[in-house]
Amino acid sequence: MAVPIKIPDVGTTVEDITIVKWRKQKGDIIKRGEVIAEIETDKAVVELESIAEGKILEILFKEGDVVKQGTVIAYVGEETEAVPEISESGISISPALINLAKRLGVDIKAIKPSAADGVITRQDILDAARKITKEQKSLENIIEMTVHQRALINTLNISSGIPVFHITSCIDMGMITEFRNRIEDIYYDTFFVYACARVIRNFPIMFSYLVDNKIVRRKEISISVAISKGEKLYTPVIHSADKKSLEEINRTIAELVKKVNEEKLLPEETKGACFLISNLGMYPVESFDAMIPPQHSGALAIGRVRKTAVVENDHIVIKSICKVTGSFDHRLANGTIAAEFLKQVKEILESGRFREDR
């Protein structure tokens, strides 16, 4: 009997999965464990391996289609084996016609079969597609949300339930600017990840999160970094960031940026962080408030670095100043903890203590 190839549980926060690319086509021979398709979750593009070997008898969805976890997307078996007929709410329909309905945007459950035996025919689908086209002409343009957009909405809904408060401070970026002038290809984010990870050591509540009114303390201090590609936003994680040197953190960020740009980020590379770094300093943004992702204790939002007149010892001097805003989960951290946290981060960055690991 033909073996169904299903979308597995890939540990995402949403059930919707996009079929990005078919590596194999109908009629191709495939081995067990060979990649049959590339699928996109809310976190990364993942290779889907075949659980069977033989000929691909049927492919039920096209590239770009969005399906749920557990959905059968193809059948593999011997050439003489028949693809099982699928029943939808008591209505029988062949896999080939399911594929046609998906391509035309037709909801099978909304079709009233013309055949007396309840079998949906090709003509039923074509008639339904023409009706949809006619109805849509009278409507405004409708754009389907991507997997990432749906995931972002889901995350925002969760984050909106966090009682958050914000505090802002100004960082003298003189030491960092001087360091970057000597060392090429080092991200601004690297310094903030370095400083925040080391300060979090002093505040165990900052590497904790809440579950069912219980505080769960993580075994490592890992920091997530917001990285965007077009309309998509990713938050890959630098694991055990407090144990990494400045160079190791910078190298890890460079690797994660490359994976994001190539859409090769793995789901496990987006899990386990306790704190988020979000940087909009490359834009004319003075300051902003970052939302706290689920299971994070807080986030640090970094604005642009600009020359600013500062009074120092009763004299006006020009310094490179950056505004940073901390967002904190008030259920975990009170104002005193948050203020002390930001004070210690500021001290590391302004004193140049990050150079000690070189």
Image: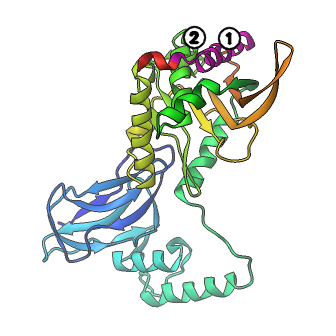
Assign the N terminus to one quadrant of the image: bottom left
> Is residue 201 depicted above or below 267 in this figure?
above
Amino acid type shown at disc 1: Glu
Mark 1 and 2 residues: CB-CB less than 8 Å, in contact? yes
What's the image's color scheme?
Answer: rainbow
Residue 241 in picture, x, y percent from top left: 44, 24
Question: Which numbered mark, 1 or 2, is in the foreground of this view?
Answer: 1
Q: Which residues are magenta?
A: 335-353
Q: Position of residue 304 (x, y in %)?
A: 69, 39
Q: Secondary structure at mark 1?
A: helix
Instruction: Relative to 265, say whether 77 is above or below.
Output: below
Q: Amino acid at mark 2?
A: Phe
Q: Which residue is mark 2?
A: 203
Residue found at the very far right of the displayed protein: 314
Q: Main secondary structure of the magenta part?
A: helix
- Camera-side residue: 195 or 127? 195
Residue 330's place in the image compared with 263, above or below, is above
Question: Can you say whether 352 is above or below 178 in the image?
Answer: above
Residue 237 location (% of width, % of height) = 46, 34
Can residue 294 be seen by looking at this rendering? Answer: no
Question: Residue 181: which numbered mark, if any?
Answer: none
Residue under label 1 = 340
Q: Residue at x 65, y 35 (%)?
A: 159
Give the quadrant of residue 174.
top right
Circle 1 residues within 10 Å: few <14, some 14–19, many ≥20: few
Q: Which residue appears at 73% of the width and 26% of the height? A: 163
Residue at (53, 77) in percent of width and height: 106
Between 34 and 176, the one lying in front of the other is 176
Q: Is residue 234 magenta?
A: no
* Image coordinates for residue 137, horizontal then vertical, percent: 70, 85
Left or right of 175, for residue 307? right
Quarter assignment of residue 56 = bottom left
